[in-house]
Image (cartoon, rainbow, N blue to C red):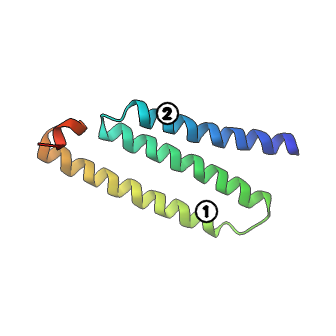
Amino acid sequence: MDFLVEIFLVVGAGIIVSGMFVFVSYRMHLLAVLFSLEYIVLGFLFLISFLLSLFNSEVYFSLFFFTLAVCEGALGLSILVSLVRSHGDDYFMSFTS
């Protein structure tokens, strides 16, 4: 049982770290930043769901977290669409002028 717990923790941490790597390396494009933030949230949701099921706790917190993640994604995409319509692309350098 301990080996399975370690595997899930390593996979969850790997998802979060790879999302942070993409966030840092592709920080010039707004769409890539939004995708990496969603990937990081997915890693946190994976860890929260696993830890709550490990302790036989309620899953309401993970559902609430998932609801907030979906709202964050919808808000980010709507901001992306409005910025692309006004500036023409999703580069951060074009947003300063």
Q: Is residue 17 above or below residue 77?
A: above
Residue at the top extreme of this rendering: 25
Kind of element beneath mark 2: helix
As drawn, is 92 to the left or to the right of 3? left
| Quarter of the figure that contains the N terminus | top right
> Which kind of residue does numbered mark 1 sit on?
Ser
Q: Name the residue under label 1.
A: 62
As drawn, is 36 to the left or to the right of 47? left
Q: Can residue 11 be seen in this view?
A: yes
Residue at the right extreme of this rendering: 1
Kind of element beneath mark 1: helix
Classify 10 Å Cα crowding around label 1: few (below 14), some (14-19), many (20 and above).
some
Residue 34, percent across and down?
Answer: 38, 44
As drawn, is 83 to the left or to the right of 18? left
Residue at 41 percent of width and 61 percent of height: 71
Of circles 2 and 1, the one toward us is 2
How far is mark 2 from mark 1, CA to CA? 25 Å
> Which kind of residue does numbered mark 2 sit on?
Phe
| Quarter of the figure that contains the C terminus | top left
Picture disc at residue 80: none
Q: Is residue 37 above or below residue 25?
A: below
Q: Name the residue under label 2.
A: 21
Residue 55, percent across and down?
Answer: 79, 62
Residue at 37 percent of width and 32 percent of height: 26
**Which tag, 2 or 1, sits closer to the chain's start?**
2
Task: Report the front residue among 90 and 25.
Answer: 25
